[in-house]
Image (spheres, helix red, strand yellow):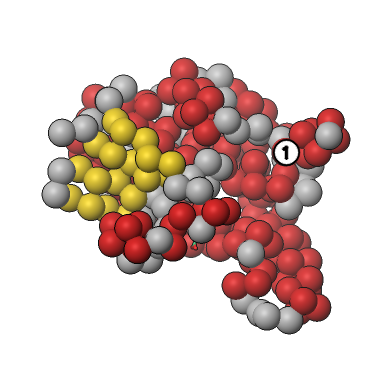
């Protein structure tokens, strides 16, 4: 039975979406439109009671949390080298993925959904402002990380193979543009993100999700 991925365009589910493409496996993508509240339906809650994407279904196995899904896909498709095999190198990638997932990502949630944190419009504006400053600092850290990793002569953030760090870096940089942070102020990150989008597996995920890397350009055109 084919793997099934519940995803929402542009959400963090882009990371496992890319991994499935990089692994070259057939899978069934199921789109959940967060803006239409499709993650709150009883049908979706029955699959993930937390009401979030990504969700990976493999027969009777249901997995949430993109870190867990990453480890699982790496185990299923070792030939895709989604994670390094060396214990320390592997732990280092998980370390950075965890930081992206538990620190940078929730900072963006404060910008994108300040109403989750206060019902008061003035407080929400304040939350958004402060979170944007934090998010900018996180992207500066990510920019320095990209420069350091690629400075070692490898094409991708974990070394020789494109993987979850590259896909998440693209997502976080793109979210930055939604927060009105010009990507060119993070030059190493932005150059890498544009290169990632040309990698065939990642490019297929970008095309399926119809992603524009710099949403500020889109806003200028309309
Ligand atoms: N730590 C979770 C984060 C999942 C998450 O925040 N998903 C967002 C999209 S990026 C979502 O489904 N949001 C809907 C909601 O929380 O109501 C993971 O790694 O899977």
Q: Nearer the viewer, residue 68 or 58?
A: 58
172, above or below 200, in the image: below
Residue 61 appears at what percent x and percent y?
Answer: 17, 50
| Residue visible at 33% across and 37% down in the picture | 83
Number of marks in the rendered image: 1
| Residue visible at 73% across and 52% down in the picture | 179
Q: Nearer the viewer, residue 119 or 202?
A: 119
Residue 198 appears at what percent x and percent y?
Answer: 55, 19
3, above or below 64, in the image: above
Query: Could you tell me if residue 148 is visible in this image?
Result: no
Query: Could you tell me if residue 146 is visible in this image?
Result: yes
Q: Nearer the viewer, residue 168 or 111?
A: 111
Q: Nearer the viewer, residue 133 or 118?
A: 118
Residue 206 appears at what percent x and percent y?
Answer: 53, 29
| Residue visible at 42% across and 33% down in the picture | 18
Q: Choose top left, top right, bottom left or bottom right for residue 136.
A: bottom right
Element type at mark 1: helix
Dot 1: few (<14), some (14–19), or many (≥20) neighbours within 10 Å? many
Residue tagged 1: 215
| Residue visible at 64% across and 55% down in the picture | 138
Q: In the rendered view of the protein, which quadrant contains the N terminus?
A: top left
Q: In the rendered view of the protein, which quadrant contains the C terminus?
A: top right
Residue 43 appears at what percent x and percent y?
Answer: 32, 58
> In the shown orientation, is residue 79 left or right of residue 157?
left
Indicate yes or no: mark 1 CB to ligand 1 under 8 Å: no
């Amino acid at each position: 039975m084919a793997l099934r991925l519940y995803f929402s365009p542009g959400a963090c589910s882009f990371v496992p979406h890319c991994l499935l493409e990089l692994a070259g496996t057939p899978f069934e993508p199921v789109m959940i439109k967060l803006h239409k509240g499709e993650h709150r339906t009883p049908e979706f809650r029955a699959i993930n009671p937390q009401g979030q994407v990504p969700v990976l279904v493999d027969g009777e196995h249901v997995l949430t949390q993109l870190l867990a899904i990453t480890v699982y896909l790496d185990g299923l498709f070792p030939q895709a080298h989604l994670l390094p095999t060396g214990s320390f190198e592997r732990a280092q990638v998980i370390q950075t993925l965890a930081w992206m997932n538990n620190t940078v990502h929730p900072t963006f949630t404060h910008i994108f959904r300040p109403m989750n944190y206060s019902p008061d419009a003035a407080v929400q504006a304040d939350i958004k402002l402060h979170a944007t400053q934090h998010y900018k600092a996180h992207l500066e850290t990510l920019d320095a990380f990209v420069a350091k990793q690629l400075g070692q002569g490898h094409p991708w953030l974990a070394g020789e193979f494109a993987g979850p760090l590259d896909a998440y870096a693209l997502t976080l940089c793109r979210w930055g543009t939604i927060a009105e942070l010009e990507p060119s102020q993070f030059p190493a990150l932005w150059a890498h993100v544009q290169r990632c989008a040309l990698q065939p597996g990642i490019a297929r995920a970008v095309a399926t999700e119809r992603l524009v890397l710099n949403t500020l350009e889109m806003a200028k055109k309309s």
